[in-house]
């Protein structure tokens, strides 16, 4: 199937500063795509180009096969939450959403009203007095309410409390179940890990990693906690294994970090009596930090 988003050699400069450097990116239909990177990496610049708010100096991007900057009709098919959300302080929450409803040409408002309840915000409240989190709720409702084919979300949970973050993630999962596409830029790695199928990691305008979550975390260091039935524990055998680091012994318990497939570790453990072993799944945060360490070392070399 045709990609919903495609960027080829996408480059953006502001004076002498290169915000994006020959970015190649593809997002397929019906997926949740996590877009990761620190402040200044170029994530927001990418999203602004995808919704037609700015143009590249080189390369090209297409959304639904069209140039976002010259295809206004394309924008009606997507919902966008910018990183810096600005609302008209003269209006109420309900008036703001009603205006957006008319601009979108929506006639069905049932889902919009449901989102107001789920995000727990009074439509009669004045925008002027809203906190950062409540302003973010209004932006999210506006993006989701028309059930667009594509959602482009820039730091969407900034300012939300944990309960509202859960409501947001539930809305993402519903969109995914309905076959819609989501591009999610976020610093909150746990939420990306929960909902994303594929992720890309951006550093200083360049892509340093991209792929399915299961592929990106397969070589990440895991933490093992192994309890033996009795002393002495085979600490020397374990320490000599190529994948073992940070080996620590506390009585009959061995804690260690392991990189790669654990067959050789399991072979050693199979020769001893164990009481218990704990090996949690590797986390996206570990992969994220590893890619940044690798990229920094490469730049230094």
Image (cartoon, rainbow, N blue to C red):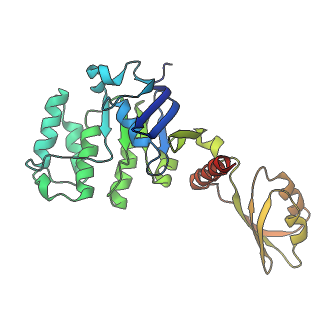
Q: Percent x, y for residue 55? A: 36, 28
Q: Is residue 21 toward the left or the right of residue 152 in the image?
A: right
Instruction: Residue 42 in the image: state x and y as whole percent.
Output: 44, 42
State whether residue 18 is above or below residue 103: below
Q: Is residue 73 visible?
A: yes
Q: Residue furthest bottom?
A: 251
* Residue pictured at 35% horizontal, 51% vertical: 167
Seen from the viewer's position, the closer of residues 273 and 231 is 231
> Given the current orientation, which residue lies at the most extreme left position?
90
* Left or right: 238 in relation to 73: right
On screen, residue 154 versus residue 210, left or right, reads: left
Can I make out residue 199 in this image?
A: no
Q: Nearer the viewer, residue 285 or 42?
A: 42
- Position of 166 with respect to 86 (left or right) is right
Q: In the image, what residue occupies the spot 31% across and 37% down?
A: 80
Please identify the quarter of the rendering in which residue 45 is found.
top left
Q: Position of residue 177 (x, y in %)?
A: 43, 35
Q: Residue at x 7, y 49 (%)?
A: 90
On screen, 50 above or below 90?
A: above
Tally of numbered discs: 0
| Image x and y of residue 203, in percent | 53, 45
Residue 45 higher or lower than 276, as above or below: above
Q: Residue at x 51, y 32 (%)?
A: 23
Q: Is residue 84 above or below residue 150?
A: below
């Amino acid at each position: 199937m045709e990609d919903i988003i495609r960027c080829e050699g996408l480059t953006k400069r502001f004076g002498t500063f290169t915000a994006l450097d020959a970015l190649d990116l593809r997002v397929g239909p019906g997926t949740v795509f996590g877009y990761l990177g620190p402040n200044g990496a170029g994530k927001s610049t990418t999203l602004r180009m995808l919704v037609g708010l700015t143009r590249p100096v080189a390369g090209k991007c297409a959304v639904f096969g069209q140039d976002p900057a010259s295809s206004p009709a394309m924008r009606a098919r997507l919902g966008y939450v910018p990183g810096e959300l600005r609302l008209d302080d003269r209006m109420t929450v309900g008036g703001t959403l009603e205006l957006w409803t008319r601009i979108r040409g929506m006639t069905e408002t049932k889902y919009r009203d449901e989102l107001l309840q789920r995000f727990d915000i009074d439509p009669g409240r004045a925008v002027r007095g809203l906190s950062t989190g409540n302003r973010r709720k209004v932006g999210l409702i506006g993006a989701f309410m028309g059930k667009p084919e594509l959602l482009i979300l820039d730091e969407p949970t900034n300012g939300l409390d944990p309960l509202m973050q859960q409501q947001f993630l539930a809305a993402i999962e519903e969109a995914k179940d309905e076959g819609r596409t989501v591009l999610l830029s976020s610093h909150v790695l746990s939420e990306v890990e929960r909902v994303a199928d594929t992720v890309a990691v951006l550093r200083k305008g360049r892509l340093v990693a991209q792929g399915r979550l299961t592929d990106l975390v397969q070589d990440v260091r895991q933490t093992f906690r192994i309890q033996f039935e009795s002393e002495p524990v085979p600490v020397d055998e374990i320490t000599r294994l190529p994948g073992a680091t940070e080996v620590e012994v506390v009585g009959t318990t061995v804690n260690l970090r392991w990189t790669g497939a654990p067959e050789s570790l399991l072979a050693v453990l199979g020769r001893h009596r164990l009481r218990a072993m704990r090996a949690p799944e590797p986390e996206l945060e570990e992969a994220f930090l590893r890619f940044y360490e690798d990229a920094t070392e490469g730049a230094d070399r």
